[in-house]
Image (cartoon, helix red, strand yellow):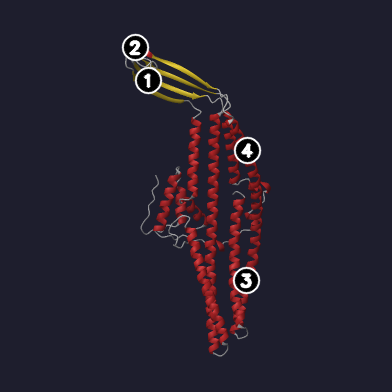
Amino acid sequence: MHVLSLGSDQRMGIGAVTRMAELLALESRSVRRSVWLVCLACGFAFGQTSPLTLADCVRLALEAPSAVQSAELEEDIAAERRIAARAELLPQFGGSMGYGYNSPTTNARNPFSFVSLNGIREYLATADTNWNLDLSGRLRAGLALAQAGRELASADLAVARRDLRRAVALAFYDAQLTRRFVALEESSLEEAREFERLARARRDRGEASRADVLKASAQVAQFEQRTEQARLDARIANQVLASFWTSEVDRELPLVDALEAPVAPPDATISDPGETGIQGRPELRRLEALNRSYEAQQAIARSGLRPDASVVLRYGLDANQLRADQRGYAAFVTVNVPVFDWFRSRSGVREAEFRKRQLDQQRAMAERTFTLEYQSARVRVRSWHDRILLTRRELDAARENLRLVRLLYAAGEGPALDLVLSQVQIAQAGRSFYSAIAEYRRAIADFEVAAGQ
């Protein structure tokens, strides 16, 4: 038994909660989910201090109610259907007890009223065994269909988990990028206000014209609008990310700054396994499971053309007197031979064959599409990595240019327009640089999807 105790003055971060949940080696998936949600609630109740990583956000989203949990239930349902299909192949055991009374008649030749009954009184207490021999293969095909259904549900679960991870990753990087834009715009706004103060001071000394002050004021107003828009975008991005696991979406999430982390080279992130790069995609496993289900449906339809047999074994009492010496046993063998069903079974076989052909075409189209996505994702990863280097040089040059232009203007040797343009340029360069990093992270996430990772 694991006991989790939290003091009133304890501050628990999601990172510590994650490690604690991992230590709880519980066998039941529902129990693990309940423990995690309790730990999460406690973590937020005592104040979240540890910033969330992407892995933390993904784990929170996976544990919260979502399409993933619905897919997990579908997998459980498919597993139960497989158990039921396997049970159909085994002998079925049962028992029955009964008593029947048939009124007598005055005719001596007919001692009881209903000729279909066995006597005035009939006592029944038997143990029965019923076993379908499955000569036609219908039950075995049903088991194969249930197994294919379970594999199909497993593939759907893998797709749901992958799509949720990707959606959380994109929302995580959007939140990171919009917060970085807020910092850039606030820095540019402060720079513009400093320029306005400098322009007013120079005008008071007669060193600058009123036009310089108006340029500076217009620049401040422009950056104030851009800052407010950046804050709005950051707030919305925070809400989108938080909505994956909580209804308190307006609370600002503490996030690890992934845009400042070292960027790994593309060769260490992606590989080129050739045509096998898409074989791990769950969509292909889903198509294979569908193909097996169509084969099972074809076998079920074909079983309607074949004979079938069942055996019933019975032991016990079925007599007119309730006596132990009246016990006995009986065996019944039933053989069903189909003769003519108006081509219903043959039509079912052909329908399954057509579905298999259709599925082969869908697989060929899917493989072409997946190969395109895989190669395009690899190209985007390399392209965005190269663009990070280019935008980094642009940002460094813009910073140095702003520094020099500010010195020239303060010395009265440069026009105000150059300073205005330099402020806009450095803001745009900063946006381009951090956008390139975020797009590189997104491209890696898309590559992992395309490669079936």
Q: Residue at x 54, y 56 (%)?
A: 169
Task: Specify which label sits upstream in the sequence, 1 or 3.
Answer: 1
Depicted 114 relative to depicted 27: above or below: above
In the rendered structure, which amino acid carries the disc numbered 3? Asp
Which residue is the site of mark 3? 396
The crowding category of the residue bearing disc 2, from other C-alpha atoms within 10 Å (few below 14, some 14 to 19, many at least 20), is: some
Front one among 150 and 9: 150
Task: Specify which label sits upstream in the sequence, 4 or 2.
Answer: 2
Q: Is residue 48 left or right of residue 273?
A: left
Distance from Cα at disc 4 to Cα at disc 1: 51 Å
Q: Residue at x 64, y 50 (%)?
A: 369
Tag on residue 354?
A: 4
The crowding category of the residue bearing disc 4, from other C-alpha atoms within 10 Å (few below 14, some 14 to 19, many at least 20), is: few
Farthest residue toward the bottom? 206
Tag on residue 111?
A: 2
Distance from Cα at disc 3 to Cα at disc 2: 114 Å
